Amino acid sequence: QVQLVESGGGLVQAGGSLRLSCAASGAIFGITAMGWYRQAPGKQRELVARIISADTTNYADSVKGRFTISRDNAKNTVYLQMNSLKPEDTAVYYCNLLQIFTNQNYWGRGTQVTVSS
């Protein structure tokens, strides 16, 4: 089993910044993709950003140029630096880990991000 623990959510004014962290532990094998998804009230969960390596990242169009995903493989931790936050970024943000060889998916419990206008 793999456990994911998120931290760093909170309340921020529009234009502000937050940094989310997600630490993974447990039975992690081989190549993994780590990422962040978000779900706003009444909406489906959507991909925000995902990283396999420093050269392999992808972002939702809505966050390109504002959010940056990175990872520290030694710590099995993924980060999401969120700048120029907008009220529409308000959502619960979930950390995700995909073990590529086994196609097993793991989720964190989520952390609330609220951006006030």
Image (tube, rainbow, N blue to C red):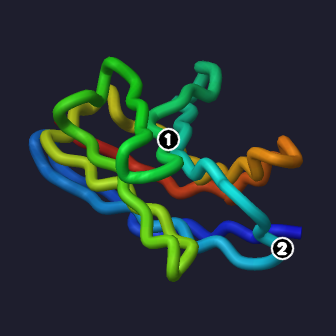
Residue 24 to residue 69: above or below: below
Residue 93 lies, in percent from the top left, at 52, 47
Give the quarter of the image for residue 39.
top right
Q: Residue at x 26, y 58 (%)?
A: 18
- Quick one: 117 or 59, which is closer to the camera? 59
- The answer to whether 6 appears left or right of 65 in the picture is right
Q: Residue at x 40, y 67 (%)?
A: 8
Where is residue 16 shown, x and y percent of the image?
Answer: 13, 50
Say which residue appears at 62% left-offset and 28% top-offset.
45
Q: Quadrant of the C terminus?
A: top left
Name the residue beneath numbered marker 2: 27
Q: Which residue is denoted by mark 1 in the rendering?
A: 50
Q: Position of residue 32 (x, y in %)?
A: 66, 54
> Residue 23 vs residue 108: left or right?
left
The quarter in which the N terminus is drawn is: bottom right
Helix, strand or loop at disc 2?
Answer: loop
Label 2: few (<14), some (14–19) or many (≥20) C-alpha neighbours in 10 Å: few
Say whether marks 1 and 2 touch (CB < 8 Å): no
Q: Amino acid at mark 1?
A: Arg
20 versus 72 height, above or below: above
Q: Which mark sits nearer the N-terminus, 1 or 2?
A: 2
Residue 1 seen in the current view: yes
Q: Is residue 104 left or right of residue 20?
A: right
Residue in front for this viewpoint, 24 or 92 = 24
Q: What SS does tag 1 mark?
A: strand
Q: Residue at x 34, y 34 (%)?
A: 89
Q: Position of residue 74 (x, y in %)?
A: 51, 81
Task: Say what amino acid the circle numbered 2 marks.
Answer: Ala
